[in-house]
């Protein structure tokens, strides 16, 4: 009986095999090696526990840890799909099916391969989408973090400096007010003979009060 396996370049195997086996000795050993390899990878893939939604806010340590685990799970799942697909194409091809159409175990094995491949491809696609979304969220967070200091600096630059003339004017008003207040204190401490008449003092009283208010409010 002819070996039913296809070589990696697509050509059929020239080796013979026993009637009750579809693979020659060489390809039977290769099949066992591939089988053990993707089974080991599948165990690793299934063992990577991953929350559906990334924990923690964007840019946090929890988010970074989740992304590392997600990438590991994705790469592992891709490798399982690649190895299972190779087994399916080369060891469960149409030539094999023609020669083993009465072998129920062969048909079930092929179907199981296809189901597992499709399931893994769907899961890997899902995790790729979740990882891409979290990457975009982290990038937006980082951009916003860089923009905030720049915006603050821009706002500081946009604050106008106080008008120099206004400052000088206020200083002059304050100087005059202090001078009036000083004269008022001197007047209050002078003797009755030196004090002005009541009418003169009453006329100056509003200015004196304003001066005192300005001095104590500075």
Image (cartoon, rainbow, N blue to C red):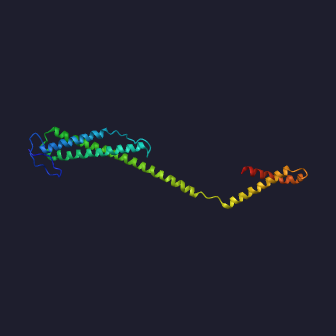
Residue at the spot 30% in from the left edge and 46% down from the top edge: 75
- Would residue 92 be seen by someone viewing this image from the given angle? no
Quadrant where the image shows the N terminus:
top left
Q: Quadrant of residue 119?
A: top left
Q: Nearer the viewer, residue 18 or 180?
A: 180
Residue at the spot 39% in from the left edge and 49% down from the top edge: 135
Q: Please indicate whether residue 81 sits to the left or right of residue 165 in the image.
A: left
Q: Quadrant of residue 92?
A: top left
Which x, y percent locates residue 121? 29, 45
Q: Quadrant of residue 17?
A: top left
Single out the residue that lies furthest toward the right. 193
Which x, y percent locates residue 88? 20, 45
The tally of labels here is 0
Residue at the spot 51% in from the left edge and 55% down from the top edge: 150
Q: Please indicate whether residue 210 sits to the left or right of residue 164 in the image.
A: right
- Would residue 63 be seen by someone viewing this image from the given angle? yes
Q: Please indicate whether residue 50 sits to the left or right of residue 11 in the image.
A: right
Q: Nearer the viewer, residue 23 or 173?
A: 173
Single out the residue that lies furthest toward the bottom. 165
Which x, y percent locates residue 214? 75, 52
Which x, y percent locates residue 7? 16, 49
């Amino acid at each position: 009986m002819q070996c039913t396996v296809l070589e990696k370049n697509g050509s059929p195997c020239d080796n013979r095999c026993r009637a009750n086996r579809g693979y020659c000795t060489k390809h039977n050993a290769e099949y066992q090696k591939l089988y053990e390899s993707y089974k080991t990878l599948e165990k690793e893939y299934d063992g990577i526990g991953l929350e559906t939604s990334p924990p923690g806010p964007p840019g946090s340590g929890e988010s970074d840890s989740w992304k590392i685990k997600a990438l590991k799970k994705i790469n592992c799942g891709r490798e399982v799909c690649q190895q299972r697909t190779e087994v399916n194409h080369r060891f469960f091809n149409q030539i094999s099916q023609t020669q083993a159409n009465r072998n129920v175990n062969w048909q079930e094995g092929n179907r199981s391969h296809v189901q597992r491949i499709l399931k893994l491809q769907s899961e890997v696609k899902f995790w790729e989408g979740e990882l891409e979304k979290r990457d975009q969220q982290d990038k937006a967070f980082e951009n916003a973090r860089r923009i905030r200091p720049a915006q603050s600096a821009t706002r500081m630059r946009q604050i106008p400096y106080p008008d120099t003339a206004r400052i000088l004017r206020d200083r002059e008003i304050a100087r005059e007010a202090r001078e009036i207040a000083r004269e008022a204190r001197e007047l209050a401490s002078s003797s009755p003979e030196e004090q002005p008449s009541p009418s003169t003092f009453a006329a100056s009283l509003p200015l004196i009060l304003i001066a005192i208010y300005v001095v104590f409010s500075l």
